[in-house]
Amino acid sequence: MSRMTRVGRGAGSAVAEALAAAMLWGSIGVVYRIGLLHGAHPEWLILGRPAAASVFSLAALLAGWGRPGRWSAAVGLLGLAPLYVTYFLAVGLVGAALASVLLYTAPVWVSLLSPIAGDRFRGRSLLYAAAGLAGVALLVEPWGSRYSPAGVALGLASGASYAGYILLARLGQRRGAGPEEVSIHAFPFAALGVALVLRPEGAPGPVDAPYVLYLAVAGTIVPYLLSARALARLEAARVAVVSLVEPVTAVALAWLLLGERLSPPQLLGASIVVAAAAAATTMEAPRSCGGEA
């Protein structure tokens, strides 16, 4: 087998791993919504995801795979905890399809706020932000008052929180933190941050367990590992573009499993948001760390 053939196959498997990670992340909101429909406790699902994923952080620590530090606390408390709370609450109010697209305004905010992490500001960021906001305007259909304003606000806040997570992780790595410190070892701090906001009453019930397990394992640990493997063999730009499958997966699953349908103007708005995110992600990708929802 020639070296070129081996490289081609390696790149192909890396793309498949990045694609699988994006699709798993795209399923999170839909699984959460299904859990609510089957009687699962929303606060235990939100808190259970980072709490259960913290077990993986402990295992990684014992295995010598990085260690927590001050950037773990910053990323977990200021980035991931607000992301988990706002995104899942948005899903509960406006549905998985719309919430997932609002979440994916994050790359636009990252391109706009990149100087916070020490990157050079580029004028194109303003264009991407304007396009993203235009897409959001079509998505929420303000002329029809179909959606809860609080749900839309939470969806946009989840996008801002996602951007905050990316910027904090990038800033931490620029100041000497390892990739594990700003990712897997941030899970326990994210759980702490969520616990400070949400106080579930009573113990989790049997109906909560399978959904928490899915959100922690299939929605967090497995896609993180797949994305890390892909980034080891592919340039960040390609992985970032593949991650755009995430909101598309969420919209498709919400339609198939929950009956959530976007109107033609909303589909146009979603396309504009994804296109703006693609442009912003491609512009920022050479310094990107990968995706997480």
Image: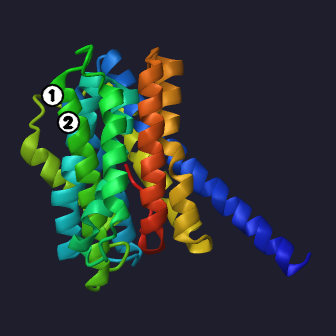
**Residue at the image point whose x is 21% and y is 28% from the top:** 151
Residue 89: percent from left, percent from top: 22, 32
Kindly identify the residue that appears in the image at 30 percent across and 32 percent down: 137
Residue 278, above or below 103: below
**Would you name the residue on which mark 1 appears?**
150
- Give above or below for 40 relative to 119: above
> Can residue 53 be seen from the camera position used here?
no
Q: Position of residue 173 (x, y in %)?
A: 31, 79
| Residue 174 image position (x, y, % from top left) | 30, 82
The amino acid pointed to by label 2 is: Leu
Q: Is residue 61 rendered to the left or right of residue 217?
A: left
Q: Which mark is residue 6?
A: none
Looking at the rendering, in which quadrant would you find the N terminus? bottom right
Residue ranking furthest to the bottom: 176
Q: Residue 9 location in percent, x, y?
A: 78, 65
Identify the residue at horizontal 34%, vertical 60% (top origin). Answer: 125
Specify whether 219 is left or right of 78: right
Q: Quadrant of residue 171?
A: bottom left
**Is 279 on the left-hand or right-hand side of 187?**
right
Report the residue marked by disc 2.
Answer: 154
- Callout 1, which amino acid? Ala
Q: Residue at x 55, y 61 (%)?
A: 239
Q: Residues within 10 Å of mark 1 (few under 14, many from 20)?
A: few
* Pointer 2 local density, CA inside 10 Å: few below 14, some 14–19, many at least 20: many
Q: Nearer the viewer, residue 272 or 250?
A: 272
The answer to whether residue 205 is left or right of residue 285 is left
Helix, strand or loop status at disc 1: helix
